[in-house]
Amino acid sequence: MGLKKAFLRLATIGLGIGLMTSAALAANLRVLAWDGYADPDWVKDFTAATGIGVDVVFIGSDDEIWAKIKGSEGQDFDVFAVNTAQLQRYIKADLVSPIDITKLPNQKDVLPRFRDLSQVSGDTKDGKVYGIPFCFDSIGLIYDTDKVKPAPTSMSVLWDPAYKGKILAYDNGEHNFSFTALTLGYKDPFNLNAEQMAAVKAKLVELKRNVLSFYTTADEAQQIYQNNDVALIWANYGQQQVKALQKIGAHVAYVNPSEGALAWLDNWVISKGVRDNAAAEKWIDFMLSKKIGGELSERTGFGNTVVESSSAGGNDKLVWLNNVEDPLKRSDMWNEVKATP
Amino acid sequence: MSGVGSTQAAERRLSQLVTVLAFALPVIFVLVPLAIFLVYSFFSVDQGTIVHSPTLGNYVRFFTDPIFLPVFWNTIVLCVSVAVICILLAYPAAYFLTTLKGRWRYALLMLLLVPLLMSYVIKIYAIRSILGLNGFLNKALVALGILDQPSTLFVFNMNAILLTLSLLLIPFAILPIFLSLERIPQTLLRASDDLGASSLQTFLRITLPLSLPGVASAASFVFVLAIGDFLTPQMVGGISGFTFGRILYSQFGTAYNWPFGAALSVALAIVVIAAILIGERFGRSRGTSV
């Protein structure tokens, strides 16, 4: 008899705890973010400041974000992080809500290039703001300060015969066509016409003859750098790559080319299925504070939108990555470049 | 009685199940995927989505586009060279092994096969730091006075691929050659000796012909493994070492053109199957004629 009573009591307690946690979960803000965008101490500070609990889910790829958001039609998350190239796809699929920036006081104090969001390509549609810039990095040029003098200012240095066989480029058709288009002075590197494509391709064949190899991972580039005479690296992994090289004692510096550096930009967006819009706005505004911005750059090496970081100087020209006109065509043409003797 | 009957029935059912499994596994895991591949090669891609209506376009493109056939041909030549190098290096090693007695023979054989236990990627990384311009090989050659300055002869090009693949695949050549050499009856060699043949004659007229089946299967092994590899060319090939495997890889990765990738794979599969058939036919006819 006593056993039965104890068992019942236990069950009641269990049920109570279950109800309590599910109630707590129901009120929590549901955040989907990349690792490093919602560190536990920030979440704790946010909850302390606003009284809003937060559940964070981390993702590992663009496709995963799409699968999670599209899969639930936006119902499973309130706020998530997505880059500018991807954002338009979410807007088109009606998975995100427009954001009222008057509710984000910190947005007024961000770095100049992020202040007017209509100037940040990909963040707006039909005059409405959908994405709030949070974290970015440029794809610049790493150069060995002992071997490259004077310091380069343009990607055109990659074609300089003086550095033949001392250049590491990146094995990706899409990016290579875009940056070469910028180097050739084309306005929109993501939408090239047939004539421009042909010119870029010819230029890439020349580039290929000047480089040592095309790398795919940052580790790989570092290993090649250590075992070979490398002067210039087209830095697909930006600041992380620079810091890793400096850590092993390499005398390298980083520059964003004057014709414009390709750069990715991650934004906070509010999903269509948001339960508490005010809480979501508070989260985004909190993330735009100077303290978080500084810590973000310190911890990840990426640029933030609030305080200056080594990703880009105030006057550097950055070109936010966008979807290209025809990825398949670029990939095929890149293979043709590589197959050219 | 009924108990015995039911166990018999159960045993029969079990053996039926095993038979079905024995046939089903290769069908599900080999034949069906191959068939899917073949079917996919007749599809096409439009705006990033696969169009499921049959077309010969992929094959037409493979044969008419100026980039694919030359790369395909170069890759075949490369892999044949790898096979030849592996045979030339593996044969003496295997022959040496058969001259050893007892336990030593297998201990050394095991040692030669130890590299197979290591991760493929790690081995490529290691070789790459050996081959680099400031790598171990160049440093050694300069230190020994063989070269005045580091050479770029084997840095990120076809030579680097050739060297790396040969190094990685030698164990696959040693094993079949060793087995065929070991299978040669000692009595034949003694008879040859009794009849007054020199050891060179014995080798050329008895050992070598009898070991050719092993050589043939070693060659087809190495060739098939080399031609299917995209990682080694990707990592040590640099700008001039562009191989068919790399094109294939890009169709599935960055290009997202699976149908065309499937068509290229079919072309590769035909060469691979041909290589295996030639290896087997050559090996068997030699084996039975003696």
Image (cartoon, rainbow, N blue to C red):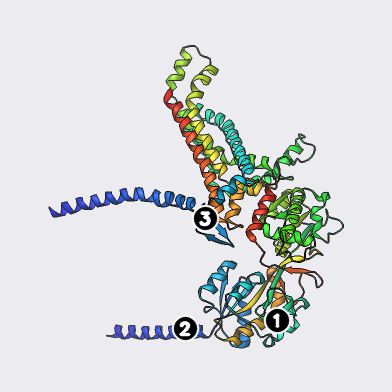
Quadrant for the C terminus of chain A in the image: top right
* Chain for disc number 2: A
Marks 1 and 3: same chain? no
The Cα–Cα distance between marks 1 and 3, rounded to whole angstroms, is 52 Å
Local crowd at mark 1 within 10 Å, few (<14), some, or many (≥20)?
some
* Chain for disc number 3: B
Depth check: give the residue in front, A61 or A321.
Answer: A321
- Residue under numbered circle 2: A22
Are discs 1 and 3 less than 8 Å apart at CB? no
- Residue under numbered circle 1: A289
Place of residue A123 in the rendered image (x, y in percent of width and height, measured from the top left): 68, 76
**Residue shown at the point (79%, 69%) measured from the top left:** A317
From the viewer's perspective, is A1 left or right of A94? left
Depth check: give the residue in front, A291 or A281.
Answer: A281
Q: Is residue B108 visible?
A: no
- First in sequence, mark 1 or 2: give its number: 2
Which labelled disc corresponds to residue B43?
Answer: 3
Place of residue B1 in the rendered image (x, y in percent of width and height, measured from the top left): 12, 52
Local crowd at mark 3 within 10 Å, few (<14), some, or many (≥20)?
many
Place of residue B33 in the rendered image (x, y in percent of width and height, measured from the top left): 45, 52
Type of residue at label 1?
Ser
In front: label 3 or label 2? 3
Quadrant for the N terminus of chain A in the image: bottom left
